Each structure stands twice: as structure tokens, then as C-alpha cells.
């Protein structure tokens, strides 16, 4: 699992970690039952305070995205296909809102914004 964070950005590091893990689960990159790095391991890898990683993990455990098994480690929760689809939908809504804000700031119409998405979709699919 690769997690990129921006230490100088406006989004708190713990939130970035939480969001990246949610996105990995929603995309299927981290399927239910898979192991995630320990708090200490991820903190060392990202060069952040372990308390920062712990906060992100606590939020994910509270949301049933992650589960902790004492003596075994931290795992992606036993999420149903519907729960994973719900995570994916929530992620899509979040990035869509960001896109809409940017498009509106540029003065784009809904048609222009939708057209740009369709064009980008085709470009990405054509690789």
C-alpha cells in the first residue's frame, strides 16, 4: 500500500492518511481482511509522529473500515460488497465536489464541466 501525503498542505496529515486508506479500500486495492501496516511501521515510512497515524486508524476503526486484532495486527474490516460500494460512492462525491468548486471558480457551465469529465475519461481509458 502506497500512501502519499503533503506535509505542507492545508489538510491535516491524519486526515490524508485516513482518506488514502478509505480510497484504497473503496477501489479494492485493499480488500476486506487484508493487513495494513502497523501504526509504528506506517509512521516510520511516512516520517510522521505515530500519534498522527494512530488518530487516522482510530477514525477508521470507529467507522468499521479497519479492525484491530490484539497480537495479530490491523486489518481491513469484513466489509460487504455494499459497504465497499458505499465507500466508493462517498469518495466519488468528495472528489466531485472538489471538481465542481474548481469548475465554478473558472466560470464553467454544467455542460462544459460534464464535457471536460467525459473527455478526461476517454483520455485516461485510451491510456
Image (tube, grey):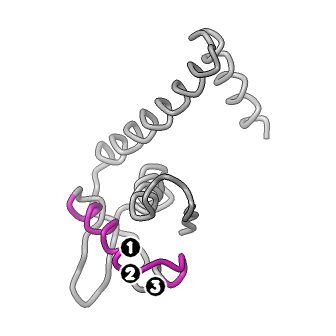
* Front position among marks 2 and 3: 2
- The residue that appears at 78% across and 35% down in the rendered structure is 126
Q: How crowded is mark 2: few (under 14 residues within 10 Å), some or many (20 or more)?
A: some
Label 3 close to label 1 by CB (< 8 Å): no
Residue 50 disc label: 2
What is the secondary structure assignment of the residue under circle 2?
A: helix
- The residue that appears at 40% across and 55% down in the rendered structure is 22
The residue that label 3 is drawn on is 41
Main SS, magenta region, reads helix
- The residue that appears at 21% across and 85% down in the rendered structure is 70
Label 1 close to label 2 by CB (< 8 Å): yes
Task: Give yes or no for residue 60 being in the magenta stretch.
Answer: yes
Left or right of residue 103, residue 11 in this image = left
Q: Is residue 113 above or below residue 28?
A: above
Q: What is the quadrant of residue 62 in the picture? A: bottom left
Residue range of the region highlighted in magenta in the rendering = 44-62
Identify the image quadrant of the C terminus. top right
Left or right of residue 36, residue 112 in this image = right
Give the mark, 2 or 3, whose residue is nearer the N terminus.
3
The residue lying toward the viewer, choosing from 58 and 6, is: 6
Residue 80: where, in percent of width, then height? 28, 51
Q: What is the quadrant of residue 108 in the picture? A: top right
The residue that label 1 is drawn on is 53
- The residue that appears at 68% across and 21% down in the rendered structure is 116
Residue 61: where, in percent of width, then height? 24, 65
Amino acid at each position: 500500500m502506497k500512501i502519499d501525503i503533503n506535509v505542507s498542505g492545508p489538510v491535516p496529515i491524519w486526515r490524508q492518511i485516513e482518506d488514502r486508506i478509505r480510497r484504497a479500500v473503496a477501489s479494492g486495492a485493499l480488500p476486506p481482511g487484508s493487513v495494513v501496516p502497523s501504526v509504528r511501521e506506517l509512521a516510520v515510512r511516512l516520517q510522521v509522529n505515530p500519534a498522527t497515524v494512530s488518530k487516522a486508524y482510530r477514525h477508521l476503526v470507529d467507522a468499521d473500515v479497519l479492525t484491530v486484532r490484539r497480537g495479530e495486527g490491523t486489518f481491513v474490516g469484513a466489509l460487504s460488497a455494499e459497504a465497499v460500494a458505499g465507500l466508493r460512492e462517498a469518495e466519488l462525491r468528495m472528489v466531485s465536489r472538489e471538481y465542481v468548486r474548481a469548475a465554478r471558480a473558472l466560470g464553467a457551465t454544467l455542460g462544459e464541466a460534464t464535457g471536460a469529465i467525459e473527455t478526461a475519461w476517454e483520455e485516461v481509458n485510451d491510456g
